[in-house]
Image: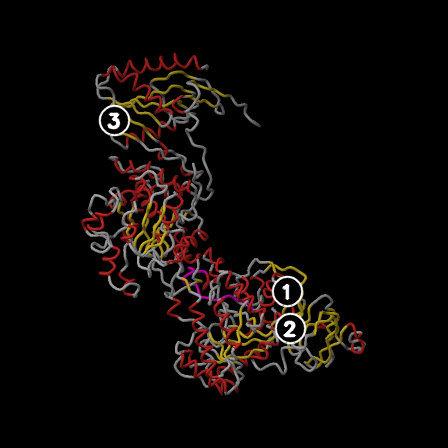
């Protein structure tokens, strides 16, 4: 995918999300740190105006909810979670860049539930690359990529210091099989 | 990620980057205490033992709560540390407790070197919660964390540690931590409790609080032990309070934005008069709540570097996956 | 009895100044003859049919070492050491004579106790064990011990071991009384108030670790006191285990002004510094403590200029359990009988260029004279009792406490590479160590090897 394709991809994704959020009253955008949060900030800007007062906004750091801490291979950096609104009974659109094994989303759902009981959670991901390890699916997907486990899918975002906005897919030949 | 230590024994061994990593991690934990469910699952299924050979309600409670907020099982074990009791040795006690499947031992002991000793004997992680007059790293970290909240730039900051520096593990850990972050540390107190030899640790020694009052940015007021007076190291509590206590009069002369810290429990009217302890420059209660975040950070970082130790590739750094 | 001939070694006898290659002949427990290679060696004896000949080419043949400061723990603390195990440790280190310190339980403060030590030494049958009697009863510093009885039973010196006589007046009486028996008083110099419960030297390591420090002045102030008392009494004062530069200067000054003062030092005090305590290892916890490099330099200077007369082991065995505790709680002391020579040789000869004879004098004839044993011991001239040690100073050895004969493993030299292995040891003409191995009962003959 070339950087030129990114704009249309994002617009398609945005339009899909807007269809639902336009019908929502008391809702929130929540991004998963760090690239999911960058995308959520973009969505907030693009969706914000249409919903009158605009959605509430928050960012999640799932490092404390990971399921691999016990493997003791070093602790992921704790970036901090920022949820300053009342989660109870809120409609929430959870935003991430890439959906892969589903483990991050599992962690993010647990994290949100520790703040209260939302009315409903939707999942919006820019890229779904398959290879799920948990039964989790996205409600709003920008694009689906057929990938192998060893492939790398990277969403490039200028806010993160990348040179361009885009999605990079790198295939790796299975080493040694 | 600048942390791959299995133990937290003291600040003297840590690099500047490791100290910053700990403080930054603690920053990320502060928010947990504001949630409706004040608990994260990070240390679920892990066992933390508070192995305290010296009474300390505050530090123990703080570690206990920190462990609980990380979903660890926390056990408290109080031992008596004495050379004469022909009981179980420190090593045996610790090994017996470890055999129950413990992941992290938090140890408090009256002897310098006890935490290091356990780190050599045990397979699990060891966090030093105070050993003799040696180190008390989490206390110093929470002090520094609190200072940093108010004064983000520590380099060049003048921090006075006032009181019995000679016998204080809090003072030593603060000296190492603050110096590594570029602060200038003063040791202030009577010459019998702040010997000039302390200047060998790179601190400015002063026996006159009034002399440094106007130049210091942060006052860390150590608790004075009545036992020192009884052993004849200074004449009376009254004279000590007069010479080294922070009172309203002295506060008029300190910098406008000076901070007052105290590791607690305060001897009101001795180290601090009530008006100073409860006054606008006091950050003593911040210290207590920050202590929780700092200890969560310590447990979290140390626990992740268990038997194998090592590093993980930051999960989401490259914008990839899950 | 047939002759034993040590052939072709480097014969060193600091008493006579001998330092030549040659043969040493032992007969009937005494040195019969020394024959240098230049004179053609002991050809006449070598020709004798029943002579037992031991080739010691390339090795040092010296008088057996005399360690005038060791704690053998018996009676009372036999789990730490017995006179039997301590004697084996001694000969394994080339030490043929040991002055056993009286801080036992009960203390050696009477004739019967001293006789017990002598008897146990004989039963063990390795080194010559001489008791040191206490200066005061039960080492309490209150009443003088019966020094006449102690002397009769064989005491070669008096000391309250690791207790400093708090009362200067008691020290005065002790020196005066011991003088009647021409015995030295070995003083442990420490002002316990100034020590302030210290566990290591007052230094930067102690400061950093928050460990209570023992200032050097706590030692030198008592050295000064005791030298002053020795001056007025003209008693024989021997300063035990010097550690501080200030103390060395005081002893030097005392000697210059004619006071009968002598002094000793241990290999660990002149080899190691307080920085060894960095990792809270109780094997570096000794009393007096390991000091600074400045102090070490002063000790070396004191050894060089003769201010320090004697090198001792201050052998202080402790069980592994006793030492496997918090540094603060661990008992003071390290073992040293088996490293006395190799540590002295490695530090002083190899590292600091001392002469071998210069070092050996402080391990043989000097302590022999101090203890009144020099007529028979401390040298290898013909007629002396054949206490002889044979050392290999060419082969490196890594100190491994697990190989010690002593029950104590608490060495501060573990893992260090040293030179000065004991190859053979003879006590009273009888071989007790052969090829580095302590011989068991019934293995006493060289012929077996």
Q: Position of residue B287 (x, y in %)?
A: 28, 45
Alpha carbon distance from label 3 to label 2: 88 Å
Q: Give residue C11's quadrant in the image.
A: bottom right
Q: Quadrant of the C terminus of chain B?
A: top left
Alpha carbon distance from label 2 to label 1: 18 Å
The magenta segment is: C324-336
Query: What's the chain of the residue with tag 3?
Result: A
Residue C328 is covered by the magenta coloring: yes
Disc 1 target residue: C420
Residue C369 is covered by the magenta coloring: no
Alpha carbon distance from label 3 to label 1: 80 Å
Q: Position of residue C176 (x, y in %)?
A: 46, 85
Q: Position of residue C95 (x, y in %)?
A: 60, 72
Placement of C236 over or under A74, stated as above or below: below
Q: Nearer the viewer, residue C272 or B300?
A: C272
Q: Position of residue B303 (x, y in %)?
A: 40, 42
Disc 3 target residue: A118
Q: Which structural element holds mark 2?
A: strand
Placement of A164 over or under C175, stated as above or below: above
Q: Main secondary structure of the magenta part?
A: loop
Disc 2 target residue: C432
Q: Give residue C121's quadrant in the image.
A: bottom right
Q: Quadrant of the N terminus of chain B?
A: top left
Q: Which structural element holds mark 3?
A: loop
Say whether residue B239 is left or right of residue B16.
left
């Amino acid at each position: 995918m070339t950087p030129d394709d990114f704009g249309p991809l994002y617009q398609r994704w945005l339009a899909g999300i807007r269809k639902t959020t336009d019908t929502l009253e008391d809702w929130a955008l929540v991004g998963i740190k760090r690239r999911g949060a960058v995308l959520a900030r973009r969505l907030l800007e693009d969706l914000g105006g249409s919903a009158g007062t605009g959605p509430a906004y928050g960012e999640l750091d799932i490092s404390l909810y990971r399921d691999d801490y016990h493997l003791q291979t070093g602790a992921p950096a704790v970036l901090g979670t920022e949820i300053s609104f009342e989660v109870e009974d809120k409609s929430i659109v959870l935003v991430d860049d890439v959906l892969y094994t589903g483990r991050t989303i599992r962690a993010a759902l647990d994290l949100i539930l520790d703040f209260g009981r939302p009315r409903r959670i939707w999942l919006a991901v820019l890229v779904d690359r398959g290879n799920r390890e948990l039964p989790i699916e996205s409600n709003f997907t920008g694009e689906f990529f057929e990938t192998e486990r060893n492939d790398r899918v990277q969403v490039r975002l200028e806010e993160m210091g990348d040179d361009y906005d885009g999605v990079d897919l790198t295939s790796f030949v299975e080493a040694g099989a | 990620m600048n942390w791959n230590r299995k133990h937290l024994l003291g600040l003297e061994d840590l690099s500047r980057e490791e100290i910053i990593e700990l403080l930054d991690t603690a920053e990320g934990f502060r928010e947990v205490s504001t949630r409706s469910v004040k608990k994260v699952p990070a240390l679920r299924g892990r066992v933390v033992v508070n192995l305290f050979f010296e009474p300390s309600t505050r530090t123990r409670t703080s570690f206990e709560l920190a462990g609980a907020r990380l979903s660890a099982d926390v056990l408290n074990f109080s031992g008596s540390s004495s050379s004469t009791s022909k009981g179980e040795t420190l090593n045996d006690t610790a090994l017996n407790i470890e055999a129950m499947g413990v992941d992290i031992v938090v140890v408090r002991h009256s002897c310098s070197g006890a935490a290091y000793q356990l780190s050599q004997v045990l397979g699990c992680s060891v966090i030093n919660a105070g050993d003799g007059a040696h180190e008390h790293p989490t206390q110093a970290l929470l002090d520094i964390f609190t200072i940093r909240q108010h004064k983000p730039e520590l380099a060049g900051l003048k921090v006075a540690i006032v009181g019995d520096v000679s016998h204080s593990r809090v003072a030593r850990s603060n000296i190492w931590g603050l110096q590594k972050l570029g602060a200038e540390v003063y040791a202030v107190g009577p010459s019998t409790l702040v010997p000039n030899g302390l200047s060998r640790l790179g601190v400015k020694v002063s026996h006159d609080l009034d002399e440094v009052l106007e130049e210091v940015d942060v006052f860390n007021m150590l608790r004075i032990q009545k036992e020192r007076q009884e052993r004849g190291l200074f004449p009376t509590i009254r004279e000590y309070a007069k010479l080294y206590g922070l009172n309203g009069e002295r506060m008029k002369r300190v910098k406008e934005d000076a901070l007052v810290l105290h590791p607690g429990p305060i001897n009101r009217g001795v180290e601090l008069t009530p008006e100073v302890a409860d006054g606008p420059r006091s950050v003593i209660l911040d210290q207590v709540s920050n202590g929780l975040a700092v200890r969560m950070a310590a447990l979290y970082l140390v626990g992740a570097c268990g038997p194998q130790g090592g590093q993980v590739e930051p999960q989401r750094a490259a914008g990839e996956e899950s | 009895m047939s002759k034993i001939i040590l052939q072709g070694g480097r014969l060193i006898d600091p008493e006579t100044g001998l330092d030549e290659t040659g043969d040493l002949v032992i007969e009937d427990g005494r040195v019969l003859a020394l024959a240098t290679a230049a004179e053609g060696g002991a050809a006449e004896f070598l020709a004798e049919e029943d002579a037992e000949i031991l080739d010691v080419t390339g090795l040092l043949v010296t008088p057996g070492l005399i360690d005038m400061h060791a704690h053998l723990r018996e009676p009372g603390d036999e789990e730490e050491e017995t006179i039997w195990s301590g004697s084996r440790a001694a000969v394994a280190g080339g030490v043929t004579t040991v002055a056993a310190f009286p801080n036992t339980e009960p203390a050696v403060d009477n004739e019967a106790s001293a006789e017990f030590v002598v008897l146990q030494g004989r039963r063990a049958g390795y080194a010559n064990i001489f008791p040191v009697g206490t200066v005061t009863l039960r080492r309490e510093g209150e009443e003088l011990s019966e020094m006449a009885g102690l002397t009769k039973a064989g005491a070669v010196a008096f000391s309250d071991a690791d207790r400093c006589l708090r009362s200067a007046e008691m020290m005065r009486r002790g020196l005066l009384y011991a003088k009647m028996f021409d015995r030295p008083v070995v003083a442990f110099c420490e002002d316990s108030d100034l020590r302030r419960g210290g566990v290591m030297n007052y230094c930067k390591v102690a400061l950093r670790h928050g460990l209570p420090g023992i200032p050097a002045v706590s030692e030198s102030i008592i050295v000064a006191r005791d030298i002053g008392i020795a001056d007025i009494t003209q008693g024989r004062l021997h300063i035990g285990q010097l550690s501080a530069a200030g103390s060395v200067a005081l002893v030097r000054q005392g000697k210059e002004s004619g006071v009968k003062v002598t002094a000793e030092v241990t290999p660990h005090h002149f080899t190691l510094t307080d920085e060894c305590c960095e990792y809270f290892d109780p094997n570096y916890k000794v009393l007096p403590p390991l000091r600074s490099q400045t102090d070490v330099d002063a000790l070396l200077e004191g050894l060089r200029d003769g201010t320090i007369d004697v090198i001792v082991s201050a052998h202080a065995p402790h069980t592994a359990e006793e030492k496997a505790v918090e540094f603060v709680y661990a008992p003071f002391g390290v073992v040293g009988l088996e490293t006395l020579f190799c540590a002295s040789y490695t530090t002083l000869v190899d590292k600091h260029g001392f002469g071998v004879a210069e070092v050996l004098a402080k391990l043989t004839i000097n302590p022999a004279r101090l203890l009144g044993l020099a007529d028979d011991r401390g040298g290898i001239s013909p007629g002396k009792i054949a206490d002889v040690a044979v050392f290999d100073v060419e082969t490196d050895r890594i100190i491994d406490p697990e190989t010690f004969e002593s029950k104590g493993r608490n060495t501060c030299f573990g893992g260090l590479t040293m030179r000065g292995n004991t190859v053979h040891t003879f006590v009273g003409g009888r071989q007790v160590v052969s090829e580095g191995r302590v011989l068991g009962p019934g293995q006493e003959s060289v012929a077996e090897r």
